Image (spheres, rainbow, N blue to C red):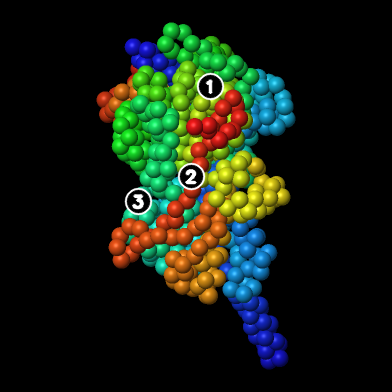
Amino acid sequence: MATLKRLALAASMLALSGMGAFADTIKIGINQPLTGSVAASGTFITDGAKLAAQAVNEKGGVLGGKQIELVIEDNKSNPSEAAAAAEKLISRDEVVAMMGAWGSTFTLAVMPKLEEYGVPMVVETASSSKVTSAGNPWVFRIAPTSEMEAKAFGRLVPKFEVKKADFLVVNNDWGRGAADEFGKMLKAQGVSVGLVETMDPAAQDVSAQLAKIKASDADTLFVTTGFEQLSLVFKQAKALGIDRRTITTGGSQFPDRLAEQLGGAADNSYHILFFAPWFPEAAANPDVAGQYIDMWNKSGFDKSGLSDGFRGFDAVTTIAAAIDKAGSADPKAIRDALWAVDVKGVNGNIKFDKVGVEGSESGQSSPNVYVIEIKDGKLALPQI
Amino acid sequence: MDQLLQHLLNALILGSTYALLGIGLTFIFGIMRVVNFAHGELYTFGAYMVYLFSVLLGVNFLLSIVIAIVLGIMLGALLEWVLLSRLRGADIDTTMLVMIGAWIIMQNAEQLIWSGVAKSIPMPFPEEPLSVGGVSVAWSRVFVFAVAILLIVGSQTLIQRTRLGKAMRATFQDRDTASLMGININMIYLATFALGSGLAAAAGALLGPIFIVMPTMGNLAVVKAFAIVILGGLGNMKGAALGGFVLALVEELGAGYISSGYRDAMGFLLIILVLMVKPTGLFARTERIG
């Protein structure tokens, strides 16, 4: 009898200590591509998220002393895996909020799960307009839409004197969305749009598309895809003797790595980014940007990841601010609090406006956009 | 006109690598009838070995390719010895399931060792492409083309003109009779699988530096390899080589003149057509091995 009592006591103590550990940390789910065709970017964004969690925890955590804990899942650069990862994060790990899921296609695959379980997600990268126009009130995007990106770049179009542009985009919601929005913007400025070529997200050989582009009389080529495929596009364009001004969009291009790996093959290219770590003084919040760059370098992460890692940093900073504002770790309360956050992020100030379907609006912030040029194998702010 | 010539040139170069993938699988699937889903992992293995030796250890680039091929042959022999030799006489489904298991284990091991982030391998060739008239091609691709043709001709010679090739053909035509004639069939199984694996590793070692190296790179490669083998006719070495060129041509012209979004679909559409019209494959004469 005595043994049984002691056992019961031990068991209840174990249960209590388990609960204690659970109550002290607040779990945030990270749904990113850590393997597959866009793994480089997803890995850096996850690194940035870790730094933000570290920064928040060093300052005493959230809700008066609770630490935040990131639960990281790999969505394998695949939409069905992204949905499965979200399901796991919500039902098994019981995260109170999520960040994800890199690409527009992955994010769109995750979104029904948010509504089903009632968990908010801060969208850090996806740029397709569909993400915030679907009437999903659990989505809060801190990345610019392709339309915002196109509009911001539109100011530079007259200076570039573009007459005719071709597009080469990855064949998914992101790529096709970018081709649509940039195409609309260019046409509105009287620029004619020529070819719109697509490539499979996993394709390694794009010579066929490039051979077609080579024969076109356009003066500018817009390319939208992740870093991995982008480096192949530049290499193969060079091999086909294509020497044309190239403008890349999306913010996940790692121009410093392109310049280093490709040398002259990346010259005469411009890259639309959302953070330019080489010129922190040009950032909207230089102090926050400086702190982020310091933490990144101290952690020994790859320097070329800075231009993309900030997305994870800003997203987790935003979620932490919302948890504090909500005053509880209830997903619905966090969702409501996200409408009220005003965070100083690396990209700029993060505040959500209501967009999309009336009555079930999604959140969208207004991020800053930067353009970087690769010239003689080096990065520069374009002199235009 | 220049555009068409450029497409044809691209197809020729891409076709040589497809042909290389196809003949590797011809040894294993076409001749041995092992539905080898792990074939793509040998391809990935070859690419990572070049990365390991040429980038991390600083070995000469050409030597790294040779080392990668030799290690691919050894890994193939190991797979045959550990897994397949126990499955002699097992039905095709059992073998297929075991190879799917091997595929998953190998791909995850690659992710564990190399991480999911893609690697790039610099090549010691001039950056300026070779341009003739309006068409251009990278020197690196000329190199790949030359080596691929060399390996294709070598394999064809091996299977048609050597004693080993003759023993292979005999073994897979009738194992019992070959055994009665004094052929060591266990050795033949081992050698055939190892050679096919070596060719997959060679394809990876040649293409890895042209493209980028990542753990999932073998997935599309293995599907295309199966398509090429079926297109060319099971077990037909010349057919597989020609099948590779046909597939590249269809993809290239399809992407260039019809729709780039359906580039990979074009190839598979062709295969469906071939299977409907000539189920034994484009270049098969009669059901005969070798």
The disc numbered 3 marks a residue on which chain? A
* In the rendered image, the vertical position of residue A89 relative to residue A16, given as above or below: above
Give the vertical position of A257 relative to A71 (above or below): above
Instruction: Measuring from the top left, give residue A10's x and y in whole percent.
Output: 68, 82
A240 is higher (above) or lower (below) than A40: above
What's the chain of the residue with tag 2? A
Quarter of the image for the N terminus of chain A: give it. bottom right
Q: Are marks 3 and 2 on the same chain?
A: yes
Foreground pick, A244 / A156: A156
Say whether residue B199 is visible.
no
Q: Could you tell me the amino acid type at mark 3?
A: Lys
The subunit letter for the residue under badge 1 reads B
Image coordinates for residue B202, horizontal then vertical, percent: 58, 24
Q: Which residue is mark 2?
A: A369
Give the Cα distance between marks 3 and 2. Answer: 20 Å
Eye-nearest disc, 1 or 3: 3
Q: Secondary structure at mark 1?
A: helix
Residue in the image at 50% along x and 73% along y: A326
**Residue type at tag 2:** Val
Q: Which residue is mark 3?
A: A130
Residue shown at 53%/53% (left/top)? A348
Image position of B61 (left or right of A130): right
Q: Nearer the viewer, residue A25 or B267?
A: A25
Where's residue B248, x and y in %? Answer: 40, 22
> Of the residues shown, which amino acid type is indicated by label 1?
Met
Give the numbered dot on residue B168.
Answer: 1
Do callouts 1 and 3 mark residues in contact (Cβ within 8 Å)? no
